[in-house]
Image (cartoon, coloured by chain):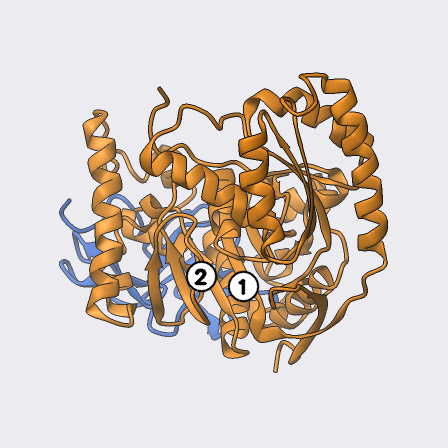
Chain colours: A blue, B orange
Amino acid sequence: MRVTALRLDPGDNVACLLRAHRAGERPASRDGPLPALSGDVPLGHKVAIRDIAAGAPVIKYGVSIGHATRDIAPGDHVHLHNLAGAEL
Amino acid sequence: MILPDAFQGYRRADGRAGIRNHLLILSVCGLNGPGARKLAAALPRAVPVFSPYGRGQLGADAKFHRDVLVALGTHPNTGAVIVLAPDAGLRALYQQQIEDTGRAAAGFSLQEAGEDSEAMLAAAADAGRDLLAWLDEQDRVPCPISELVLAVECGHSDASSGMIANPLAGDLCDALIAAGGAALFSETIEWLGTETILAARARSPEVAERLRDFLRERQRTARAAGRDLRLGNPGPQNHDGGITTLEEKALGAIRKGGTAPIAGALAQGAPVPGPGLWLMDTPALSPESITSMVAGGAQAVCFTTGHGNPYGSAVAPTLKMCANPETVRRVPGQIDFDASPAFTGEAPRRSLLAPLAARFLGICEGAPTGAERAKECDEVISRLGPSV
C-alpha cells in the first residue's frame, strides 16, 4: 500500500498529507486509512485524526504546536482557521 | 549498528581525524583576493578559502575572523596550507599557528615579494604543486567513527523538508551520536518558538539558559534594527505549504538535529568539546552558519533542501539530501541522497536510514559530493562588527 499521509510521531493528533486530497477521501497512513476528509486539503497540510476540543493542544512531532481555536473533528483540515500558536 | 565502528580517514599529527586531505589556499585579507583567485585557477585541486576582509577589524570581530581562518587552516580535513597575506606579520601569524599543529604550510606575502604579485603567485604555485605531491603520498587509515562531528543545516526548505528530510537527517545524527560521535545544528533564530522544548532537552539548567540567551540576543539585535522576528513568521509561503504556527515551523527545522539531549550551546565558531548533540549560535544564512560549524570542527555537513540548493562547504564535504521528487528530478547532480521515496509514500522514512548512513560513510571515505563535483563550495566568515 502506498501511504498518502504521515503521522510524524505516535502521539500526534494530526497527520500531514503527502499529496493533495479531495473532500470525502480517506488518506492512507501506515496505521491504516484515516478519517474521511471534510474538505479538500492540499499537499503538506495537516488533518485531524482525532477529536480536538477547542483550547486543546494540537500535537505534531510529538509536541504541542499550538491550540485549537474551535472544536476540530477527525478529518478536518487543521490550519489558520482553527489552530493558533502560543500568544507572542 | 547503522554505522560501523571505524571509517577510513586521515590521521593528523595533532591527533585529529579528517575525511579529506585538502591543500588549502588560505587568503587572509581582501588585498590578496585577486591573486588568490589566479592561484586557485593554477592549482585546481586546491581548496580556496578567501577572506574579503582582514584589516581594520576590531575586538570580537577581529578575533572571530582570525580564529575562523586558523580553525579552517588547522581543520581535520586540511593536510597542508598555502597562506597568502598582504604583509610579513600576518603571513607569519597564520603560518606559525598552522605549522604548530604539524601541518605543512607555505606562506607568501605581497610585502615580502616586493609587491610583485606575479612573482609571488609563481612561487606559491610551485610550492602548491610540491604540497599536493606530498599529500598524494598519504594513505587513509582506520579511524574510530566516534571522532566524526556532523553539522546539519537546512536551506530553501519546503513541505518535504519538515516531514521527511529533516527528520531523516535527525535519524543520522542520532545514529552517529549512538556510535559515540557528535552532531550540531545552528541558525539561532530558527529556534524561535521551540525555546521551551529545547530547554527541556538541555542537559543542565545552565545549557538551557545559555541557549535562551543566544536567542534573546539575536532578537535584541533585530529589534534594534526595527525588525520583530516573530512578526509575520511563519509567512504566507509557509502557510501555503501547510505550516500554521511558529512552533511548528521551528520544530520542523530543529528536527534535523535528531532527538538526543542537548549537551551544550556553543558560541559561533567555538570548538565542539565532545560527543553528543550541540547547538551553535549563528546567523541564519547557510554559508555563514555552515562555516561557523566547520570552524567548530565538523568534518562533514548534511544539508537538507526542498527546492534545491547548490551550496557546499569548501572544507567539509556537504551531503545534500532532498525528499521532494520534483527537485530530485530537476537537479539530480545536486542531490547526494534521494529521500523522496518516503515523501511519495513508497518507503517508510526509517527504511532510508541505512542507505543514507552508507552514503554518508562513502562520502567520509572519499566519494565526492555533488557540490564537490560542481566546485560550488565556499566558506563565508561572518562579520560581528564594523570596520574602522
Corner quadrant of residue B39: top right
Q: Are marks 2 and 1 in contact (CB under 8 Å)?
A: yes
Q: Which percent across, then down, holds residue B373?
A: 77, 43
The answer to whether B122 is drawn above or below residue B273 in the figure is above
Residue B126: give x, y in percent of width and height: 83, 35
Q: Residue at x 32, y 44 (%)?
A: B189
Residue receiving disc 2: B272
Which labelled disc corresponds to residue B321?
A: none
Q: Identify residue type, mark 1.
A: Val
Mark toward the start of the polypeptide (2 vs 1): 1
Farthest bottom residue in view: B1
Relative depth, front residue between B376 and A83: B376
Screen quadrant of the N terminus of chain A: bottom right
Question: Residue B107 lies in what quarter of the image?
Answer: top right
Q: Amino acid at mark 2?
A: Val
Q: What residue is pinned by disc 1?
A: B149
